[in-house]
């Protein structure tokens, strides 16, 4: 009896997945539980295991095909069993291809004839010009104010298809940036005590052969602590309702070659620093190896992005919906501060910038949250509170 | 009518016949583009009517207008050239068989629209009257045109203003395939003249002298300011309506019976009987007519095509 | 300069041309004793007599034939068709005969006549007395089509039309007859096929015909108060068109709104739009070419419905504003 292999649904909101590769050829035997193929969702790349033992047959989706979840993509036959015509007949309906197909349309710039003429005359690449007209149409004035393209002909660009994680990030970031009114708040933090506390924790960790506590790990703990006290920052906007979420799950932005991914430290408020450190290290390592499971990236309620290790001192980040805030943290650098006694002192200073959804978070709320967070970073013993 | 004029009428009738027979041949040889409407068998109508005019009088012709054109004194070479669409034609190849015109010679043009000339005749008559010129305008049309609205508007206007117009209806008994028996509830089209307050008369259109007499009376009336008349020439076309006509609407016997009433043979016999003409002289006239047409066709064939660069010339003045 | 109405300007043109040239005469229904259905020929019957101001029976095709035949034989007639709707009855002679005779005769004929006729809605005359059928005649080679929008243009263009050696369809507008404007007393001509910029502006070009020129100028005045400077161009002669001022204007403003009363589909606006798109002005367009025209429907009787069947000043203002502000 032939067993169908279906495109599994791996995440809640997932509608399709892309075949990356088949790990068995048609006609080859596979044991139940062995990896059969690799698929890529919006967030992750996963191995799909064989649902039964058998001979792979009736493969109807090729690498790069986008297949709706629950569609049959192949069959597993018993030895000696022949493929039936129905197997071939029930071909996977190729899904209405989403962004991939609209991509060529995007490549064509909407511009007025006048703008096109000016662009020709001024050697301006129209696609580099931001259009101010209806539906983003490039008008003549847009071309006039745009810089002249330096060299022609432009060297052939290396084309990287926008797909997988990168495409998802691109679409989500664009949607968030266009759809969510962002408001930004920056605060400086004296990290002297934080660094002392982290050094002390790491000394203990070393003795206990426990995981090293990174700045990020300790920041996750502090953020969770502050979120406990400011639940509006740990909320989501659903229509006309603000839902204050019952869990504090802090996502940590990780830059990969394939794009940006945000694994999540679940229940960060309930975990010890050591547990958080272990979890963060594990998630980062898994992310780099491409082994994140769907659950690893699900359920975040707030995101932390730390570009300190790259030397960035201050930046703003784009909110990761349906979350309502993201904290962008820069590097800790020695800087001159005025002490409470009025003395100029050189202290290790960190700049953190909160980006918040202004529909939910107003200035005072953000200020209170940031002040609370600074308080705990400057006095880490409060974490024991 | 003196003998010379009678002989001239015979010559015109032969010339028309020769032209149209030659036209058929050229068509058969594939040398003619489009179509044509032949008046073979109707020569008495064209020649008799125009014989009643002075050279400075005007005519408006129809799609079946070769006879009118020749009787009005057209240059056969320019006419043949137009027929063949040549630059030397009357209309520089723009008009063709259906639109041959010679305004200088008093021919204000054949017309591709049935009844198209009837309202124009009103304007020409008005113009003559306003300019107090001593001319008349003779407007030919067929039996089919008498059933069009312009017939009503035109005859009425010409009558109320007493314009110098002679309306000559060449009743060849068929509007394409539709016989007058099916298209009219009255025996004679000329009966309609009474409705417009003008004289109407029906004559044997195959009797060139009868036509001449009737039209002459109408011309006299027009020239003396008494207004228009309607003359109906009862005749028959031997050929189909146009080159694409298979003659399915009438019998071979009917056509043959009318061929026996050939206006040319009839007039020729009359002239010979009257002693105005010998058999030899008649043959000579016939031969000369065919020769004249052959030479006109030779001229036309040797003539250049219109210059393509001139294609839009004549659209606007 | 003294001001007279559009109707008086037309009458003056007719009178002066009839005085100047004996070949000029008037022919039409009720043009004589009655003075014309809209009074344009009032007084001319008395002045020139029934031989030069000729009342006809109700025979539109006859009138068209009469001016065709008369023009063909040396006269310079001016016909009148009481409503443009009835040009349909006259069209066989105008379209098949007059327009083509010169060409069919290889250039061996001239037909110097004018056929005057009032077009347009706004008088409550409903569907069979309100049409704007200019484009039917624009489509016919051999005819010229003139549509004056002011008293000054009416006189100058009518004299030029009478002196032109071609059949000219001269389309007046019922709502313009009583409009006053400066008109010189002496005879003058406005050459046919000269478009005119009726108002200068740099933000938007409005090309309008007949009564829509007046409405567009009113709209332009309102928009000027908002800081939008509209250039209004009046083709005046629709065929043969002097396209250059239109193209030049569009090249200047980059935006063009075409306004006419005739139904949009198959209307003159489509021709203008195509002409602009095919021209040098294409490369200067900053927005789609926009047409504002009569709805594709017969003119209704009801006052409100009639009003909304064709463009009005407020429609022109709204559309021009949208276009000038880059919202189209």
Image: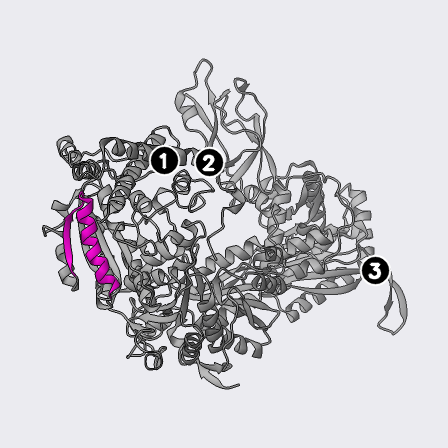
Q: Is residue A11 left or right of residue B3?
A: right
Query: How packed is label 2: few (under 14 Cα within 10 Å), some, or many (20 or more)?
Result: few
Where residue A104 appears, as percent x and y from the top left, is 58, 43
Where residue A158 appears, as percent x and y from the top left, is 71, 38
Q: Is residue A258 left or right of residue B174?
A: right
What chain is tagged by disc 2?
Answer: A
The answer to the question of whether label 2 and label 3 lie on touching residues, with beta carbons closer than 8 A, is no
Mostly what secondary structure, the magenta segment? Answer: helix
Q: Quadrant of residue B242?
A: top left
Q: Which residue is mark 2?
A: A70
Secondary structure category for the residue under label 3: helix
Where residue A58 appears, as percent x and y from the top left, is 47, 23
Where residue C75 appears, as percent x and y from the top left, is 39, 65
Disc on the earlier residue, 2 or 3: 2
Q: Residue at x 44, y 36 (%)?
A: B299
Q: Are marks 1 and 3 on the same chain?
A: no
Q: Which residue is mark 3?
A: A192
Which numbered mark, 1 or 3, is in the foreground of this view? Answer: 1
Q: Which residue is mark 1?
A: B293
Q: Quadrant of residue B161?
A: bottom left
Image: magenta residue range: B199-224
Secondary structure category for the residue under label 2: loop
Q: Quadrant of residue B6?
A: top left
């Amino acid at each position: 009896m032939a067993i169908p292999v279906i495109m599994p649904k791996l995440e809640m909101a997932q509608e399709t997945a892309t075949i990356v590769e088949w790990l068995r050829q048609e006609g080859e035997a596979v044991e139940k539980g062995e990896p059969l193929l690799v698929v890529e969702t919006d967030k992750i790349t996963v191995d799909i295991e064989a649902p039964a033992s058998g001979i792979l047959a009736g493969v109807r989706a090729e690498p790069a095909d986008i297949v709706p979840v629950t569609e049959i993509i192949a069959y597993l036959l018993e030895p000696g069993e022949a493929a039936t015509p129905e197997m071939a007949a029930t071909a996977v309906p190729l899904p209405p291809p989403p962004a991939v197909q609209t991509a060529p349309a995007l490549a064509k710039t909407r511009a007025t004839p006048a703008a096109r003429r000016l662009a020709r005359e001024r050697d301006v690449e129209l696609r580099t010009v931001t259009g101010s007209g209806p539906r983003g149409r490039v008008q003549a004035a847009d071309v006039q104010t745009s810089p002249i393209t330096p060299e022609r002909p432009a060297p052939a660009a290396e084309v990287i298809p926008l797909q997988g994680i990168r495409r998802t990030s691109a679409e989500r970031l664009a949607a968030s940036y266009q759809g969510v009114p962002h408001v930004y708040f920056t605060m400086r933090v004296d990290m002297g005590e934080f660094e002392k506390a982290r050094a002390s924790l790491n000394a203990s960790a070393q003795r206990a052969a426990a995981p090293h506590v990174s700045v990020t790990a300790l920041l996750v703990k502090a953020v969770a602590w502050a979120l406990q006290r400011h639940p509006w920052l740990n909320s989501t906007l659903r229509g006309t309702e603000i839902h204050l979420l019952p869990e504090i799950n802090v996502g940590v932005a990780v830059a990969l070659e394939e794009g940006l991914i945000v694994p999540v430290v679940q229940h960060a408020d309930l975990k010890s620093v050591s547990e958080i450190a272990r979890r963060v290290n594990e998630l980062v390592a898994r992310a780099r190896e491409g082994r994140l499971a769907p659950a690893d990236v699900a359920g975040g309620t707030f995101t932390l992005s730390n570009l300190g290790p790259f030397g960035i001192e201050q930046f703003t980040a784009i909110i990761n919906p349906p979350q309502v805030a993201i904290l962008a943290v820069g590097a800790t650098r020695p800087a001159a501060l005025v002490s409470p006694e009025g003395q100029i002192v050189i202290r290790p200073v960190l700049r953190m910038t909160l980006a918040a959804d202004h529909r939910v978070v107003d200035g005072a709320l953000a200020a209170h949250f940031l002040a609370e967070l600074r308080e705990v970073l400057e006095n880490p013993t409060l974490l024991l509170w | 009518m003196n003998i010379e004029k009678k002989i001239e009428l015979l010559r015109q009738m032969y010339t028309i016949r020769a032209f149209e027979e030659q036209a058929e041949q050229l068509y058969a040889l594939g040398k003619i583009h489009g179509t044509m409407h032949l008046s073979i068998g109707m020569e008495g109508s064209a020649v008799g009517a125009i014989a009643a005019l002075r050279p400075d009088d005007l005519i408006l012709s129809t799609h079946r207008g070769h006879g009118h054109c020749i009787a009005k004194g057209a240059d056969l070479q320019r006419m043949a050239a137009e027929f063949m669409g040549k630059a030397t034609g009357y209309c520089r190849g723009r008009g063709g068989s259906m639109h041959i015109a010679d305004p200088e010679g008093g021919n204000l043009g054949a017309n591709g629209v049935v009844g198209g000339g009837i309202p124009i005749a009103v304007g020409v008559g008005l113009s003559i009257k306003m300019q107090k010129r001593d001319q008349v305008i003779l407007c030919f049309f067929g039996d089919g045109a008498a059933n069009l609205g312009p017939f009503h508007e035109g005859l009425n206007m010409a009558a109320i203003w007493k314009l110098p117009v002679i309306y000559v209806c060449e009743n060849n008994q068929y509007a394409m395939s539709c016989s007058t028996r099916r298209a009219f509830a009255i025996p004679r089209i000329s009966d309609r003249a009474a409705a417009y307050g003008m004289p109407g008369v029906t004559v044997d259109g195959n009797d060139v002298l009868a036509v001449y007499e009737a039209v002459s009376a109408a011309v006299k009336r027009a020239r003396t300011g008494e207004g228009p008349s309607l003359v109906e020439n009862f005749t028959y076309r031997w050929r189909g309506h146009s080159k694409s006509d298979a003659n399915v609407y009438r019998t071979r016997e009917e056509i043959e019976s009318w061929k026996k009433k050939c206006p040319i043979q009839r007039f020729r016999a009359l002239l010979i009987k009257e002693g105005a003409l010998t058999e030899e002289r008649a043959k000579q006239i016939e031969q000369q007519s065919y020769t004249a047409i052959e030479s006109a066709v030779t001229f036309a064939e040797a003539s250049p095509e219109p210059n393509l660069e001139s294609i839009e010339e004549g659209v606007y003045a | 300069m003294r001001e007279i109405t559009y109707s008086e300007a037309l009458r003056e043109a007719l009178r002066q041309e009839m005085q100047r040239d004996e070949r000029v005469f008037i022919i039409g229904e009720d043009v004589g004793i009655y003075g014309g259905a809209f009074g344009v020929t009032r007084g001319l019957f008395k002045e020139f007599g029934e031989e030069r101001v000729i009342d006809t029976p109700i025979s539109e095709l006859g009138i068209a034939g009469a001016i065709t035949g008369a023009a063909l034989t040396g006269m310079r007639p001016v016909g009148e068709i009481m409503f443009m709707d009835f040009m349909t009855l006259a069209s066989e002679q105008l379209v098949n005969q007059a327009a083509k005779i010169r060409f069919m005769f290889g250039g061996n004929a001239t037909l110097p006549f004018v056929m005057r006729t009032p077009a347009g809605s706004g008088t409550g005359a409903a569907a069979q007395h309100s049409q704007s059928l200019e484009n039917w005649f624009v489509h016919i080679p051999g005819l010229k089509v003139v549509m004056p929008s002011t008293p000054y243009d009416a006189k100058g263009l009518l004299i030029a039309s009478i002196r032109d050696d071609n059949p000219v369809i001269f389309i007046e507008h019922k709502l313009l007859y009583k409009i006053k404007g400066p008109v010189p007393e002496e005879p003058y001509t406005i050459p046919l096929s000269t478009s005119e910029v009726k108002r200068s502006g740099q933000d938007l070009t409005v090309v309008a015909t007949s009564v829509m020129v007046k409405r567009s100028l009113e709209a332009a005045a309102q928009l000027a108060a908002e800081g939008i400077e509209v250039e209004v161009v009046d083709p005046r002669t629709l065929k043969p068109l002097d396209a250059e001022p239109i193209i030049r204007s569009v090249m200047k403003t980059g935006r063009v709104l075409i306004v006419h009363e005739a139904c949009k589909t198959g209307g003159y606006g489509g021709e203008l739009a195509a002409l602009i798109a095919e021209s040098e002005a294409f490369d200067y367009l900053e927005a789609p070419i926009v047409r504002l025209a009569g709805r594709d429907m017969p003119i209704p009787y009801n006052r409100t419905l009639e009003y909304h069947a064709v463009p009005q000043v407020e429609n022109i203002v709204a559309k021009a504003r949208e276009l000038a502000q880059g919202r189209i």
